[in-house]
Image: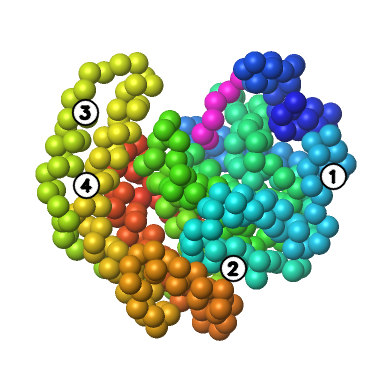
Amino acid sequence: MTLSTPIHHAFERHGIPAPRVFGMIDDPLCIVMEMLPGRIDSATIADAAQQRKVREDFMAIIARVHALPINAFDAVRLPVPRTAEEIALNLYAPSQAIFAERIGGRPWPLMEFAWSWLTRNVPKDRDRLSFVNFDGGQFLFDDAGHVTGLIDFEVSSLGDPAAELSGMRLRDSTEKLGDLTALVRHYETLTGDTISRKLIEFHTAGFCGVNGFLMWPLMFDSAPEQDFVAYQHYCVATSRWMISAMAAHDDVLLEDPPGPTRDPLGFAQASRHLVRHVKAMPCGDAAADYQRDSVAAQALHLGRVNDYGQSVRAAHIADIESLTGETPADWEAAQAGLSRWIVEHGGEPGTDAALIRLFHHWLKRQSFLLEGCGQAAYLTEVDLQPILDD
C-alpha cells in the first residue's frame, strides 16, 4: 500500500472530494482509482466570476481538510509533531537528512545555510497542526464551475496549514491560481486563522528548500535516464525562490548582480556544432525525441558555460573572499571555506543578510547560464507571486 491510498480513504470517510481508490496492482506498483471529471489549471476558465468561484471553492475544501482531526490519518502513519519547532520542520527535516546523506560530505554552503536559517527562524507562536499537502494547489474542476476533487498527495505531512498556502505559490508558477493574497484572506475568513506574510515566507523558503535538499545532490551524481539540465533548472529556480523568500522574511533588499562577461575558455563553435548535430539526428518516438532535445539542451548549456563560466566563477569567488576575508585557491576551496564560515558565524548580526545577497547573486548568474536551455528554460524568467500584508 502506498502513502496515497490511506489518504484517499480518509478523505472519502470525511466527505472530502478526491478520487476513490479501488485497489492496488503489485507489478507494476500502481493505484487503481476513480477517474474524476474535469481538468486542471483554473486559468483556462474564461468567465472571471466562475474562475473566482472555483478558486474560492477550492480554498473552502482545503479549509475543511485542515479542520479534520489528526487521528483521521492514523492509517497513513505519518509522524506526529508536538512542538512548534517539530510542526514547522516536519517535512523539511527529513529532506535535509536525505540531503546530508546523499551529498556525501561535499561542501554545499547554499543548502547548509538554508537549514541553518530555517532552524533559527521557526515561528514560535504556531502550534496549529493539520494534514498538509505541501505540493498544494492541485484540483480538478468541470465546465459548470464545480470543483470535482483534490489530486496528488505524495508530498503530504502533518504540519502547519500555512505551509500548504505557501506551497501554492510554487503551483502558481505553472498553473495560475489568481490573486493569492485574496485567497489567503479568504482562507482566514473561513478558518479564523491569521496567516502573516512572514509566516508565508518562512514556509515558502522551507518548501523551496525541500526541492533543493532533494535535487542538488543529482548535480553531482545523476542517473543516465535523468534530464540533467531540467533538474538543474529546478535546482536553480527553487533555490532562487528560497533565497528571495528569506530576503522578504528578513526585509533584506536584493539587487541583481552585473551580467557575466563573455570570455570563452575554448572554441565557442564546438557547442554550437554539437547542438546542430544533435538536432539533425533522425526523429523517433516521443521518448527518443525528448532524449534528443535534452542532449541538445545540455550541449547548449555547456556552450554558455564555456563562454561565460570563467566570469561567473570569478565573481562568486570574489563575493566569498569579500565576505570571509580569505582568498580561496580554487572553486572547491571557495565552497569549503564558505561552509566553514557559515558554521563559525551563522546567525551573527548581519550575516544572514550578507549570505542572502551572496547566494542571490550566485543563483542569478546560474540562471543566466541556463537561459534558453531546454523545455524548463522558462523558469529563468519566473518569480513567485508575492503575498502582501493588508
Q: Residue at x 65, y 21 (%)?
A: 29
Check disc 2 and give the amino acid type: Trp
Horizontal placement of 114 versus 380: left or right?
Answer: right
Q: Which residue is mark 2?
A: 117
Q: Secondary structure at mark 2?
A: helix
- Residue 108 shows up from this direction: yes
State left or right for residue 33 relative to residue 143. Answer: right
Q: Amino acid at mark 1?
A: Ile
Q: Nearer the viewer, residue 176 or 274?
A: 274
Question: At 22% from the left edge and 18% from the top edge, which residue is drawn?
Answer: 282
- Report x, y in % for residue 121: 65, 69
Residue 52 forms part of the magenta stretch: no
Residue 189 in view, yes or no: no
Question: Residue 54's mark?
Answer: none
Helix, strand or loop at disc 3?
A: helix
**CA distance separating discs 1 and 4:** 52 Å
* Circle 4 residue: 303
Dominant secondary structure (helix, strand or loop) of the stretch shown in magenta: loop
Q: In the displayed structure, would residue 8 be above or below residue 162?
A: above
As for residue 39 lying within the magenta part, the answer is yes
1 or 4: tag closer to the N-terminus: 1
Residue at 64% from the left image edge and 31% from the top image edge: 151
Mark 1 vs mark 3, foreground winner is 3
What range is drawn magenta here?
Answer: 37-42
Nearest to N terminus: mark 4 or mark 2: 2
- Tell me which numbered mark, 3 or 4, is placed earlier along the sequence: 3
Q: To which residue does mark 1 refer?
A: 70
User: For the residues carrying marks 4 and 2, which lies nearer the camera in this image?
Assistant: 4
